[in-house]
Amino acid sequence: MALVVAQEVPTSSSMAVPHGPAGVGEARHRMRDELYRSGVSESVVDDAVLILSELLSNACRYGRPLGRAERGEGDVLAAWRVDSSGGLRVEVTDGGGPTRPVPSTPSVTARGGRGLNIISALAQDWGVRDSATGEVTVWVVVTEGHRREDFAARVGGGSGFDFLDAHDDLD
């Protein structure tokens, strides 16, 4: 005889992530595990994990940590929740920084600067919320089948560069 134990899987979760690259992997793994157990589709989970990575990386690069920021100590807060319609909201909160999160237009050869363009291409919606205490929260809503048709152009910053055009002489 097998004993089956029902496990309650949360539809929302939050965790403190060390300000820096060390906790990003742990946050991705926890999010992936919890969302899969909650029955969220694989494509939404994959997009959400990528979005969480981008948000945490940006928070650690451009934002101050929460807590004892003056000493360089503290965390950022990662949170996610599934709403009743199956949409997923991902949020990352940091201690704020000198600039506001805005998509950039990187050159074709730039090594970075595409994170918010990736988020814009994958998300149904996203935005920034400021608190009275200086904290900044970037929030993203991810839904099934919402990936934009012009994904490559959005991620590339709309440069118009086409890899195949650059190699026309290979035919």
Image (tube, rainbow, N blue to C red):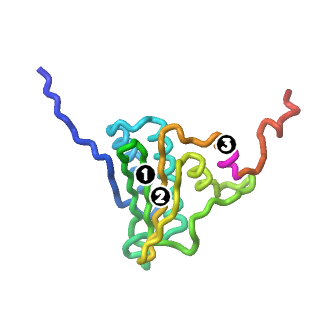
Identity of the residue furthest to the bottom in this view:
70
Residue that appears at 52% across and 37% down: 145
Q: Position of residue 9 (x, y in %)?
A: 27, 42
Mark 3 or mark 1, which is nearer the start of the sequence? 1
Residue that appears at 48% across and 37% down: 43
How many neighbours does mark 2 have within 10 angstroms: few (below 14), some (14-19), or many (20 or more)? many
Instruction: Give the residue type at disc 3.
Output: Asp
**Magenta stretch: helix, strand or loop mostly:** helix
| Rendered view: 54 above or below 34 | below
Magenta stretch bounds: 152-157
Mark 1 vs mark 3, CA separation in Å = 22 Å
Q: Which residue is mark 3?
A: 150
Q: Position of residue 32 (x, y in %)?
A: 40, 43
The stretch drawn in magenta includes residue 156: yes
Residue that appears at 45% across and 76% down: 134
Mark 1 or mark 2, which is nearer the start of the sequence? 1
| Rendered view: 44 above or below 92 | above
How many neighbours does mark 1 have within 10 angstroms: few (below 14), some (14-19), or many (20 or more)? many
Secondary structure under tag 1 reads strand
Identity of the residue furthest to the left in this view:
1
Please give left or right for residue 126 compared with residue 155 in the image.
Answer: left
Q: Which residue is mark 2?
A: 139
Q: Position of residue 124 (x, y in %)?
A: 53, 48
Answer yes or no: do the residues labelled 2 and 1 have beta carbons within 8 Å? yes
